[in-house]
Image: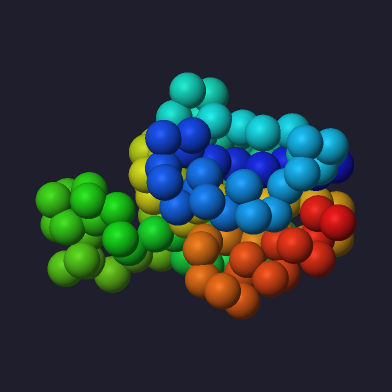
Amino acid sequence: MKKAFTLPTCKTCQRIFDELTPADHGCEVVDIKAEGIAAEDLDAMKAHAGSYEALFSRRAMKFRSMGLADKTLTEEDYRALILEEYTFLKRPVFLTAEGVTAGSAKAEVARARDLIS
C-alpha cells in the first residue's frame, strides 16, 4: 500500500510531487478536497505518526477563523477536525505500510523519498 494525500492546486504539493515521484511511483493519489480523507486512512496515518496532532496543520486559514488557536484540543478533536475539513491535514502526506510523512519540511520530504522508493 502506497498512498499520497494531496491538494492538486497546492503549489507546494505540486513541487514536492515533481521532485519525489516519477511517473511510475506506484502511489495511489488521493485528492483530499475532492475525495476527502477516509477515517481508516487517517487512523493508519496516526498509527505511524503517533498522534493526530502530528498530522494537524495549524497553518490552515480556518484554524484561526474558527477560534481554535485559543482552545485546548484533544486527540479526538484533532481527528474530528481533520475528517471534517481537509485543510487541517498537513500536506502532502505519503502513507505506506512502513510509515507516514506529513508536511513540506525538508526532513519530511527526505523521509517521503525513502518511503516511496
Rendered location of residue 63, percent (x, y) = 24, 55
Residue 69: x and y in percent read 20, 66
| 32 lies left or right of 73 | right
Location of the C terminus by quadrant is bottom right
Q: Residue at position x 72%, y 47% from top?
A: 21
Residue furthest to the top: 34
- Residue 50 vs residue 86, the one in the foreground: 86
Residue shown at 49% from the left, 34% from the top: 8
Q: Quadrant of residue 98?
A: bottom right
Residue 102 spot, x, y in % from top left: 57, 60
Q: Residue at x 17, y 50 (%)?
A: 66
Q: Which residue lies at the image location 66% right of the left edge and 43% below the top edge? A: 4
On the question of residue 93 being in view, the answer is no
Whether residue 59 sits left or right of residue 10 in the image: it is left
Q: Residue furthest bottom?
A: 107
Is 60 displayed left or right of 4 in the figure? left
The N terminus sits in image quarter: top right
Q: Is residue 16 left or right of residue 67?
A: right
